Amino acid sequence: MNLRQPNANEATGTINRSRNVSPMSGICSRCIDGCKGNCELWLSSFRGREVLYPGPFGEVTAGADKNYPVDYSHLNIQGYAVGAKGMPEGVEAGPDTAVFSSVNTETSYGWNLKVKMRLPIFTGALGSTEIARVNWEQIAIGAAISGITCVCGENVCGVDPQLELDMNGKVKKSPEMDRRVEIYRRFSEGYGEMLVQMNVEDTRIGAAEYVASRHNLETIELKWGQGAKSIGGEIKVPTLERAAELKKRGYIVLPDPTVKVHQISFKSGAVREFERHSRLGFVTREGFLEEVDRLRDIGFKRITLKTGAYSAVELAMAIRYGAEAKIDLLTIDGASGGTGMSPWPMMNEWGIPTFYLQSLMYEFCERLSRKGMKVPDIAMAGGFTDEPNVFKALAMGSPYVKAVCMGRGLMIPAMVGKNIGKWLDAGELPKTVSKYGTAAEEIFVCYEDLKQKYGERMKEIPFGALGMYTFAEKFRTGFQQIMAGTRNFSIPYVSRRDVMALTEEAATISGIAYVMKAYKDEALEILLD
């Protein structure tokens, strides 16, 4: 069975002319000399490297569509007719108390100093891509009022147009980072936090020192990688001057804006934009432990780590080194993750898919636990959008997985809410929205709840944050229903026995009981007693 047909995809703005396509190559079965397009081979013939990336940059998020042999749809959630675990102390379980709306959806992460969240989800990293910058206010405030963590991604200081460096090349002032911290803190209520990622370039310019000294942030995140690509972060740069500025700051910029022929190509219109790339990191045990110690000396109370869909070796390194360093959260991002900018072929064809990666994670954590080592709290990422799959990830990873990082799944509601606000202002509501009303109070089902809580401050909450909060409330209700159905009334009671594998292959990969074997011994005991 072909898992992915290359050479044409909506993400790259390409399509095959023919209805009949060779599955492996993605080339039309009858390719005509004189075809006017528009497959990737055709477009690459004159636009070259531009075709590597989903677009248009700054207006889209992208997620790969390779159909992996096994994923979370190969698990189903168990349901029970008896019991109620995790009820509040002193509350006797019964039909009037064990109702789904009483399920506690809170979780926490941290080695010693815990961060509580109202839901077991948090945002993906919103870094230096344009789509992240323009939607930061919507998502940061949405995360704050929803009580979940918001992750500020890599390179935010480094690409800040107004960045000021001191005589040592370290961050002296970054208005963009200042803006992001200030926005999040407007509505921060003690649930969740804002943490900042850093990569090679961030380390070189002292981004960690800046956010610690200027903003007193408690948590910093080291980034090894992500699920969307196995190279550094990328953005597109629209002007020659800006490209030259970023190269001067130490970034890899392609085509090189200082080369005369590339300047001529840009001015003629052949080259329309440049790419800014981050460097690859080189991980060693000693270097990692030393960096964690350095960041703690700066003043950070919590250190987290984000790693990508690398091989089993890098996964083992992340878990073992993280345990030795006593990090507060390890986020493991499986293939294929969402992105603001990553090479489309790489997104589809590299890395260990999330389901397989989590299966390895559980095996490795069990091995360390049996050695008597405490494992850091873990979050899974890579393709999650709804409460059933989040529950499956928590159950499959129990007791190690505390939350799920949702990138596009939380970003899209923020963008929808933002655009509803724009359509309202312009008097251009589409029928898909106007059928619910023509005012915010009518359209957003949670509007009055927030208005009652925030009163006059409601005008400070952007529509995107309202959209994200409304999605979070839908998530909460659906998650409570699933939890109650498994008779777990708080998250720590969720276990691997609460899910079952629908295929023997999924059971073999994950170690989750096959549906025909799950609870078989208990069932036979009842029958044969």
Image (cartoon, grey):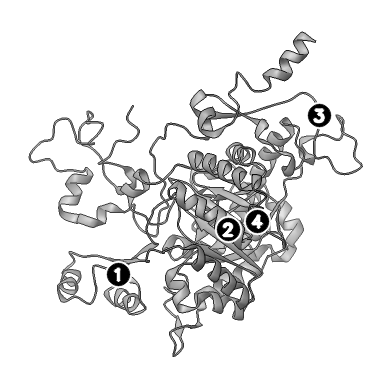
378 with respect to 278 (left or right): right
Residue highlighted by disc 1: 253
Residue highlighted by disc 4: 148
Q: Nearer the viewer, mark 4 or mark 3?
A: 3
Q: Nearer the viewer, mark 2 or mark 4?
A: 2
Name which residue type carries label 4: Ile
Q: Nearer the viewer, mark 4 or mark 1?
A: 1
Residue highlighted by disc 2: 322
In the picture as drawn, the residue positioned furthest to the left comes out as 33
Task: Mark 1: give few (<14), some (14-19) or many (20+) Cα within 10 Å.
Answer: many
- Tag 4 near tag 3, CB within 8 Å: no
- Tag 1 near tag 3, CB within 8 Å: no
Residue highlighted by disc 3: 83
418 with respect to 117 (left or right): left
Count of marks placed on residues? 4
**Which numbered disc, 2 or 4, marks the residue that appears first in the sequence?**
4
In the figure, residue 80 lies in which quadrant? top right
Q: CA gap, disc 2 to disc 1?
A: 32 Å
Q: Nearer the viewer, residue 53 or 436?
A: 53
Q: Residue at x 55, y 58 (%)?
A: 321
**Which numbered disc, 3 or 2, marks the residue that appears first in the sequence?**
3
**Which numbered disc, 4 or 1, marks the residue that appears first in the sequence?**
4
Q: Give the SS element for disc 2.
A: helix
Name which residue type carries label 2: Gly
Q: CA gap, disc 1 to disc 3?
A: 60 Å
Question: Can residue 90 be seen in the rendering of this structure?
Answer: yes
